[in-house]
Amino acid sequence: MSTPHDVNHQQDRDRENAATANSASVATTLSLHALATTPPPAMMPVRLKVNGKERSLHLDTRTTLLDALREHLHLTGTKKGCDHGQCGACTVIVDGRRINACLTLAVMQQNVEVTTIEGLGTPDNLHPLQAAFIKHDGYQCGYCTPGQICSSVAVLKEIADGIPSHVSLDLLAQPTRHADEIRERMSGNICRCGAYANILAAIDEYAEGQTS
Ligand code: FES
Ligand code: FES
């Protein structure tokens, strides 16, 4: 036989079940409404030359260059660290200059030449800077490494092209490959493992080899 206590409990459960069913139906109505009122994404053709190959894509205009490379071209060597321009893991070389691929839309890069880590070297045919990173232990987890290497290649070109940095003392003089110059120019590439000293040694050895 039910006691008054049991009856109260049953009434509480009935009220909870009714509230749950009610909020589920409100959520369904809201998401159907959102589906009905959200316009479809704007799509656009995008042409890029990536690692020497012409690539044609049809993309949502909100697609970043990073997502176009990773999700659409399956070039996953370029890493997504922060997706906010703060870590440098997504660094690629566009028309000879390094950029953060997470901070630019693919549609803004029509007909450019993009070089990713896959375009610099392969496991069977390493870029000399990749070999130097291995030799000097320039990484631990390796997640930032593709961005570090793409950035290093472009940094050395910036110095060779006479582009001054924040620590260049004379803005009109040819910058030198001083450790402070390299550190400053590589400061946008964060390595959470702290392999900075070894990264610097790897860049230095590679640059020496280029000039000797
Ligand atoms: Fe682009 Fe971090 S993923 S800067
Ligand atoms: Fe680990 Fe750079 S090697 S974050």
Image: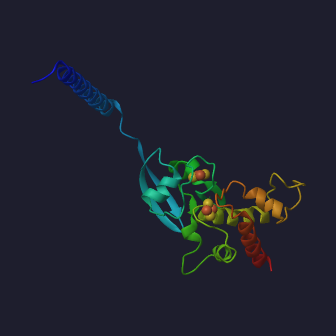
Counting from the top left corner in percent of width and height, residue 131 is at 65, 77
Whether residue 45 is visible to the viewer of this picture, yes or no, is yes
Counting from the top left corner in percent of width and height, residue 169 is at 89, 54
Side of 32 where 130 appears, left or right = right
Side of 82 where 15 appears, left or right = left
Quadrant placement of the N terminus = top left
Which of these two is toward me, 25 or 114? Answer: 25
Q: Residue at left 54%, top 55%? A: 80
Q: How is the image coloured?
A: rainbow
Q: Is residue 41 above or below residue 20?
A: below
The answer to which quarter of the image holds residue 27 is top left
The answer to which quarter of the image holds residue 188 is bottom right
Q: Is residue 146 above or below residue 67?
A: below
How many numbered marks appear?
Answer: 0
Counting from the top left corner in percent of width and height, residue 46 is at 47, 53
Quadrant placement of the C terminus = bottom right
Q: Is residue 100 above or below residue 211?
A: above
Which of these two is toward me, 66 or 25? Answer: 25
Counting from the top left corner in percent of width and height, residue 49 is at 52, 63
Whether residue 162 is visible to the viewer of this picture, yes or no, is no
Q: Is residue 39 above or below residue 121?
A: above
Residue furthest to the top in view is 4
Which of these two is toward me, 135 or 112? Answer: 135
Q: Residue at left 52%, top 53%? A: 65
Side of 61 where 97 appears, left or right = right
